[in-house]
Image (cartoon, helix red, strand yellow):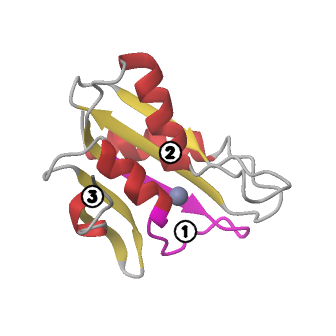
Amino acid sequence: MTKIDLQREAAKAMEKAYSPYSHFKVGAAILTEAGNIYAGCNVENISYGLTICAERNAIVQAVAAEGPGMKLKEVVVTNHNEAGASDACSPCGACRQFMIEFSDKDTKVTYPGENGDIVTTANNLLPDSFRF
Ligand SMILES: [Zn+2]
């Protein structure tokens, strides 16, 4: 799998986003340690608080397919605003904690920054994550 595959899958999922409130479409694609790709989009809800982000959508699908041992190798996130352009937007705190649950120290995360994609790790995004 290549970064281009993940970008393409994230973009395909983004087009399916349900975002009638924010008009901000997000897509995420993940590569698991098992070598599979799963993609998700944001699904908003009129109550707002029940909205699920693209990253968590993709991870939930991966667990449903691979089971509780699923591990993330890489996560790629993309988005479009109402004008169809990409905005700098990092994963939210809930998604960071969700990614950490299935990550190791090398799990790569790519998302749109001010000057192109930012490539980092899940650990860098949430260095002191909640753990027992
Ligand atoms: Zn999120």
- At label 2, counting other C-alpha atoms closer than 10 Å, the crowd grade (few under 14, some 14-19, many 20 or more) is many
Residue with the mark numbered 2: 56
Q: Which residues are magenta?
A: 75-93
Circle 2 SS class: helix
Circle 1 SS class: loop
Amino acid type of the residue that numbered disc 2 sits on in the rendered structure: Arg
**Residue 122: assigned label:** 3
Residue displayed at 25% across by 68% down? 128
Confirm whether the magenta stretch covers residue 130: no
- At label 1, counting other C-alpha atoms closer than 10 Å, the crowd grade (few under 14, some 14-19, many 20 or more) is some
Of callouts 3 and 2, the N-terminal one: 2
Where is residue 107 shown, x and y percent of the image? 21, 49
Q: Is mark 2 within 8 Å of ligand 1?
A: yes
Circle 3 SS class: helix
Residue displayed at 71% across by 70% down? 83
Q: Nearer the viewer, residue 108 or 56?
A: 56
* Location of residue 122 (image quadrant): bottom left
Where is residue 91 shown, x and y percent of the image? 45, 63
Amino acid type of the residue that numbered disc 1 sits on in the rendered structure: Ser
Is residue 119 shown left or right of residue 66? left
**Residue 86: assigned label:** 1
Gap in angstroms between the C-alphas marked 1 and 2: 20 Å
Q: Nearer the viewer, residue 121 or 115?
A: 121
- At label 3, counting other C-alpha atoms closer than 10 Å, the crowd grade (few under 14, some 14-19, many 20 or more) is many
Confirm whether the magenta stretch covers residue 81: yes
Residue displayed at 25% across by 64% down? 119
Q: Nearer the viewer, mark 3 or mark 1?
A: 3
Of callouts 1 and 2, the N-terminal one: 2
Amino acid type of the residue that numbered disc 3 sits on in the rendered structure: Ala
- Position of residue 42 relative to residue 22, above or below, is above
